[in-house]
Amino acid sequence: MTVSTLNSIAEFDTNGVTTNFPFFFKFLVNEDLVVTYVSPLGVSTPLILGTNYTVNGAGSDVGGSIVTSAALPGPGQLVVARVMDAFQQTSLRNQGKFLAETHEDVFDRLTMLIQQNNSNFSRALSRPFGRDYFYGEGRRITDVADPIDNQDAANRQFVAAYVANILATGQGPINNAFNVIYSDGNSVGQIIRDKLVTVVNSIVALRAVLKTQYTHVFVSGYEPGTAGGGMYEYDSADTTSADNGGTIIVAADGGRWKLKFQKFVTVEQFGVLPIAGRNNFTRLQNAVAVCVAAKIELCGGSGVFECGSTLDMSYPTLVFRGNGFRNTVFKFTGSGRAMDAIGTRPNNGIYSFDLDLSDFTIEGNPATTDLLRCRINHARIVRINTREASTTAGCGFRFGGTVAGHYEQLTMSTNTQLMTSRPANGIIIEADPTLSGARATCNTLLSVCIEGATGDGVVFNACDQALVLGGASENCGGNGLTETAGCQMNSYLGFDCEHNLGFADIFIAGQDSNLTNCGSTRYTYIDNSARNIKMTGGWYDKVEVGVGAVGVEIAGIKTRFFGGPVGLVTNNNPFLSTNKIFDATANTYVAYGKPATGVALTASPMTYTNTNITEDTILIVGGTVTQIAYIRLGIPYLLNPASGCIRLQPGDGITINYTGSPVITRIPGGSNNQ
C-alpha cells in the first residue's frame, strides 16, 4: 500500500440533486474524515458521520466517496478533509515478525500527517522568499483587533470611527478631509472620493460632473426618465479619447468617463430610445461602429426604435441582438431599404465575412423595398421578424451571393403580426450582381415562416446547394416556393406550402434538387426545364411533371391528400420514374405506366441505344431478322433467337441485322411498383 496522491482535501459544488461525492486520496478509517457543508449564504456546518453522511473506501489506495443522506442545496460547497490525530499506536517488537503491511500502515499514517500539516501551512499567511512583506492572496482577514501601536493593522470599524471622530471634533480645515493623511500616503478625502458614487439622471448631467469630486458616477438614464446610462468610471490616465456618445463621455472639464460593462452594451446607452418621432439613425449607426471597433456585443432593449435612413450593418464580426422580436422593433420611416449588410468593409483583408443578427423585428412602410438585405458570407441571422413594406417591390429578406449562411426562424407573417402593407416576397436568395453575379451557395434555412406575401413566398434564384429544414410558406399571392431554372442541388426537407394563390404551391425548375417529406395543399409543378429532381415522401394534392422535365423520380408520396380531383399528372413524360404513389382519396396505390412508342426503322444493321434514365424494353416482331447483338460498354453479345423482348438498362443498346423489315416498339420503364 502507498500514499500516491498529494492532496488531502476535496471540494465539491452542491446543486440540490447530487448525493454521491467521490474523492481520490487515501484515508485509513472513516473517522479520519471531516466533512463540512458551506450553504449558499456562506454558513459553514460540520456534518455528522452516520447521521448526515456515510463513507466508502477506507484503506483504499484510490480513495473513496461521501454519500450524503440528503441532497445539499446549491449553489453551495461540500469540503472533505483528512484530519488525523497526531499519535502512533503501532508497536514494533524487537526481533519480532517483519509484517510489511503493518510497516506500510505506519509509514502511510506518518505521510498523511505530513500532508495534513502541509495543508494547514498552505492556508496560513506567508511571506514570499526574498520579500519583506506577507502575501494575503487577495483574501479578507476577519476578526482583526483594534490597532494599538503605530504599525498595527487597522480594521474597518476602527477607521470609520476614527474618521467620524475627526469630522465630529472639527480637526483640520472644516469639510476638507484631503488634509487628513492616511498611512498609505492618500488623504482621507481621496479615499472617500474614490469610494463615493454620485447619481445623475442623464448623460448631459454626467458631462457636468467634476473629475476632482468623484471617480464613479451612476447615470440613471441616457435622458431623464429613460433607459440607458449605467455606471461610469473616471479614467485619469486618458486625456485624448474622443467622446463617442456611449462608452466614452468627455465632461466639460476634460475628464474621460468610461462605461463599466462586461460582455455587451445596449443601444439605449448610445441614446437610441423608443420615443415616437425620434430619429435614432445617427445614434444607432454610431453604436454599431463603436461596438464593432471595440469587439463588443450590441443589444437592443424593448420598444419601437424609429430610424429615418437605411441602417448600415455592413460590418464583419458585428454581433447585434434584440430582446426578442416581439419586444425589440426597429421601425424604418424612410424609403428604400430598411437594413443593409452588403459586405463592403474588410475583415482582416477579406471582404464579406461573419455577421450575427438575432431577436428583433424590422418594420417598414409602403415605401420600403428590402427590409433586410444581406450579402455577407457566413452570416448567422436568427429569430428576425420583418413586416410592412411595398406590396409590389418589398421583400422581407434578400440574400445575394451569400455563402454558408445560417438563417433560422426568419418570419414574415400576417399571423404573427397583422400588416397593412404586406411585402411582395418573403425570402429571396439570389446572385450578387456586384460580384460578377456570384451565386448563393451552401446556405441553410431552418424553420422559416412566410405567410401573406403578395407575390411568391420563398424564391431561389441562382442558388445552389441550399438546405431547407422545416418551415412553411402559406397564403401568399404567388407561389409558396419557387426554384427557378439554373438552380442546382438544393434540398428541401419537411417544407410545407399551403393555400398559396399563384401558379403553384411549389414550383421547381432547377436541377439535382430533392424534396423529402414536403407538403402542398394545392398544386406542385415540376417544370419542363427541371433536371434530375427527386421527390420522396410527403403529402400533396395535385402533382404535375412537365413533359419536358428529365430524370424526375417520385417515390412514396401521397397525392389527393386534401381531396382534390386529380393526383399525379405525368403528361406521359418518358423520363419520369415513379414508385409507390398512394392516392389518399381513393385509399390505394396507383400505377402510372408509360405508353409504348414505335421506334423508327433505319437501314440494316440498325443500332438502338437506351439514352433514358430508366430501363427500356424493346419488342421486335415480324420481318426477317438475321441477328441481334446486345451491346454494353461497346462490347456486342449475340442473342438467339433473333426476336422477342429485350430489356435494356440505361446506356445499353442493340444492333439489329435484317433482310425483311421488322416492327420495333419501345416500352418505357419507370412505372409504379407497388
Image (tube, rainbow, N blue to C red):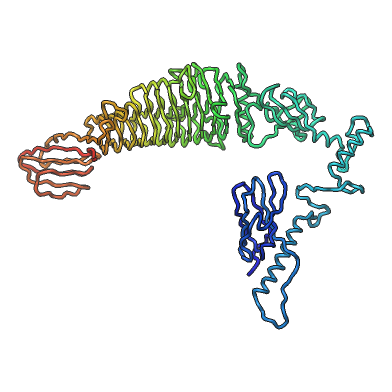
Q: In the rendered image of this protein, does residue 595 appear above or below residue 141? A: above
The reply, left or right, for residue 411 in relation to residue 91 is left
Viewer-proximal residue, 238 or 59? 59
Which residue is at 23% across, 32% downward? 573
The reply, left or right, for residue 252 in relation to residue 488 is right
Q: In the rendered image of this protein, does residue 481 appear above or below residue 52? A: above
The reply, left or right, for residue 343 in relation to residue 551 is right
Which residue is at 38% across, 36% downward? 491
Residue 163, by quadrant, is top right
Q: Position of residue 270 (x, y in %)?
A: 65, 26
Viewer-proximal residue, 194 or 537? 537
Q: In the rendered image of this protein, does residue 557 appear above or below residue 27? A: above
Give the position of the C terminus as an image quadrant.
top left
Residue 430, by quadrant, is top left
Give the position of the N terminus as an image quadrant.
bottom right
Q: Position of residue 56 (x, y in %)?
A: 61, 61
Which residue of the protein is positioned furthest toward the bottom in this rendering?
95
Q: Position of residue 252 (x, y in %)?
A: 77, 24
How many tags in the picture? 0
Which residue of the protein is positioned furthest toward the front in this rendering?
51
Q: Position of residue 280 (x, y in %)?
A: 61, 21
Viewer-proximal residue, 23 or 29? 29
